[in-house]
C-alpha cells in the first residue's frame, strides 16, 4: 500500500474537520444541502494525501454520513439517493486518483534511485584520508528531488602528491551529466600521469574538447566547465592551485579564513572565444602556504552566490567558521552548509559541492618546494 505523503497527521485532522463541518452545515445551515459539497470534497482531499486504505475509509464514512443526515432530516428517498450518488461518484474518482498518484510516486522513486546510483558512480565518496591529508566532501542539490547535476569533485593520491578537482559544468540536463562523466574520468586517468598541475589542466581541457567534437555539439559561451585543480605534496607546507574560471578556494587556519585568488586568471575548461582562444597559453600554478593544522576549502558557486532575503551574497570570510572548533574537515563542511542554510532561510538557489582537505596539526614539513 502506498504511504501517505506530506504531513499525514495534519491531513487526517483536516479530513475530520471537513466531515464535521459538512455534517454541521447540513444540520444547522440556513439552506438545505449546505454541507453536501464538503462531504463530497473530503474523499478527494484524503485521496491526494493519504494511503488507499485510509482514503477508502474516508469515502465510506462520507457516504454513510450523507445517508444518515438525509434520514435524520427526513428528506425523501429520491433526495437520499441523489446525495449518496453525488458523494459515491466523487469518492470513486478520488480512489482512482489515489491509485494513479501511487503509481506515479513509485515511478518517481525508481527514477530517483537510478539518479542517485548514477550520482554515486560519477561522484563517489572520496577516501577519508589521501596521503597525509584528512578529506571530506559533500554535495547538496538545490532541489531535494534532484540527485544529480553539473557540480563535480574528486580527490586522488598520485605519485605527484594528493590532487583534487572541483568544478561546475555550465549547462543542464544530460549534456551536463555527460560532461561531468568525461571530466571525472579524464581526471582519474590523467592525475596519475601528468607530471605537473599545468599539464593536467591542459589534458582535461583537451578531453572536454574531444568529447564535444565527438558529439558534434558546438561549444560557446554557455558550454564550458569552471574548475579548480589543487596539488598538495606530502611533507611540504604548500598547496599548488590552478584556477580555470572557478570560485577561489579558502584556507582556514588559526582563526582566519583567507581567500586564495589566482595570480593569473584563466579561461574555463572547454571554452572557445574565437581569436581569444589562440591567445596566450595557460599560466603556471599558484603556490600558497598550507601549514600543519590548516584546511583547504574548495567550493562551487552555490556557496558564494547564496543570497539572503535582501539579496546580499553569503561571505565565507565573515561567517566566523575559523573561530569554531572543527576536529575533522567533515565538521567544517557541516558548519558551512548550516551557515548557508541560515543565510538563505529557504531552499538553495544552486547546487553546492564542497571539499575540505586538512593537514593534521602535528604534521611538520620535511622540506620546501
Image (cartoon, rainbow, N blue to C red):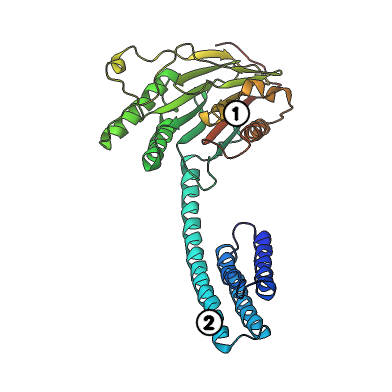
Name the image quarter holding the C terminus.
Answer: top right
**Residue 238 at what x, y percent from top left?**
58, 15
Mark identifier at residue 310: 1
Q: Does 149 sit above or below residue 46?
A: above
Above or below, comparing residue 156 to residue 146 in the picture: above
Q: Is residue 351 visible?
A: yes
Write down the residue under mark 2: 82
Say how many tags the image has: 2
Q: Picture quarter containing residue 79? A: bottom right
State the separation of the CA atoms marked 2 and 1. 56 Å
Taking the image as shown, residue 346 lies to the left or right of residue 154, namely: right
Q: Nearer the viewer, mark 2 or mark 1?
A: 2
**Looking at the image, is 267 positioned above or below residue 308?**
above
Q: Is residue 196 visible?
A: no
Q: Give whichever of 123, 37 is nearer the camera.
A: 37
Residue 333 falls in which quadrant of the image?
top right
Q: Report crowding for label 1: few under 14, some 14 to 19, many 20 or more residues within 10 A (C-alpha).
A: few
**Residue drawn at point x = 60 percent, y = 12 percent:** 367
| Helix, strand or loop for disc 2 | helix
Please identify the residue farthest to the bottom as the structure is shown. Answer: 77
> Who is closer to the viewer here, 233 or 63?
63
When the figure is inspected, residue 111 is found, relative to residue 60, above or below; the finding is above
Q: Residue furthest left?
A: 216
x and y percentages locating residue 47 in the rendered image:
56, 67
Say which label, 2 or 1, has the lower sequence index. Answer: 2
Image coordinates of residue 248 in percent, x first then y, are: 53, 21
Helix, strand or loop at label 1? It is loop
User: Could you tell me which quadrant the N terminus lies in?
Assistant: bottom right
Q: Position of residue 155 (x, y in %)?
A: 52, 31
Q: Please name the residue shown 58% across and 84% down the image.
A: 80
Say left or right for 266 vs 157. left
Amino acid at each position: 500500500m502506498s504511504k501517505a505523503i506530506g504531513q499525514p497527521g495534519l491531513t487526517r485532522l483536516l479530513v475530520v474537520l471537513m466531515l464535521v463541518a459538512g455534517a454541521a452545515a447540513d444540520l444547522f445551515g440556513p439552506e438545505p444541502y449546505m454541507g453536501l459539497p464538503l462531504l463530497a470534497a473530503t474523499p478527494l482531499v484524503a485521496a491526494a494525501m493519504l494511503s488507499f486504505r485510509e482514503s477508502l475509509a474516508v469515502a465510506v464514512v462520507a457516504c454513510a454520513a450523507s445517508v444518515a443526515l438525509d434520514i435524520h432530516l427526513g428528506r425523501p428517498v429520491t433526495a437520499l439517493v441523489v446525495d449518496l450518488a453525488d458523494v459515491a461518484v466523487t469518492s470513486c474518482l478520488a480512489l482512482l486518483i489515489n491509485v494513479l498518484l501511487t503509481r506515479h510516486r513509485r515511478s518517481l522513486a525508481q527514477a530517483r534511485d537510478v539518479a542517485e546510483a548514477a550520482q554515486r558512480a560519477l561522484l563517489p565518496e572520496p577516501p577519508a584520508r589521501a596521503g597525509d591529508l584528512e578529506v571530506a566532501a559533500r554535495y547538496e542539490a538545490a532541489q531535494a528531488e534532484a540527485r544529480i547535476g553539473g557540480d563535480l569533485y574528486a580527490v586522488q593520491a598520485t605519485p605527484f602528491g594528493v590532487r583534487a578537482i572541483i568544478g561546475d559544468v555550465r549547462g543542464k540536463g544530460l549534456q551536463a551529466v555527460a560532461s561531468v562523466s568525461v571530466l571525472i574520468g579524464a581526471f582519474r586517468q590523467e592525475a596519475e600521469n601528468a607530471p605537473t598541475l599545468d599539464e593536467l589542466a591542459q589534458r582535461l581541457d583537451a578531453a572536454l574538447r574531444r568529447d564535444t567534437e565527438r558529439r558534434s555539439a558546438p561549444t560557446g559561451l554557455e558550454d564550458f566547465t569552471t574548475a579548480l585543480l589543487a596539488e598538495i605534496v606530502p611533507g611540504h607546507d604548500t598547496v599548488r592551485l590552478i584556477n580555470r574560471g572557478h570560485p577561489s578556494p579558502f584556507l582556514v587556519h588559526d582563526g582566519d579564513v583567507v581567500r586564495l585568488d589566482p595570480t593569473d586568471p584563466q579561461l574555463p575548461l572547454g571554452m572557445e572565444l574565437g581569436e581569444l582562444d589562440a591567445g596566450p597559453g595557460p599560466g603556471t600554478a599558484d603556490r600558497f602556504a598550507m601549514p600543519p593544522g590548516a584546511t583547504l576549502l574548495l567550493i562551487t558557486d552555490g556557496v558564494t552566490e547564496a543570497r539572503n532575503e535582501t539579496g546580499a551574497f553569503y561571505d565565507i570570510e565573515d561567517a566566523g567558521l575559523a573561530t569554531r572548533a572543527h576536529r575533522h574537515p567533515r565538521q567544517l563542511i557541516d558548519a558551512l552548509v548550516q551557515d548557508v542554510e541560515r543565510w538563505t532561510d529557504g531552499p538553495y538557489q544552486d547546487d553546492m559541492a564542497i571539499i575540505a582537505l586538512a593537514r593534521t596539526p602535528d604534521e611538520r614539513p620535511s622540506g620546501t618546494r
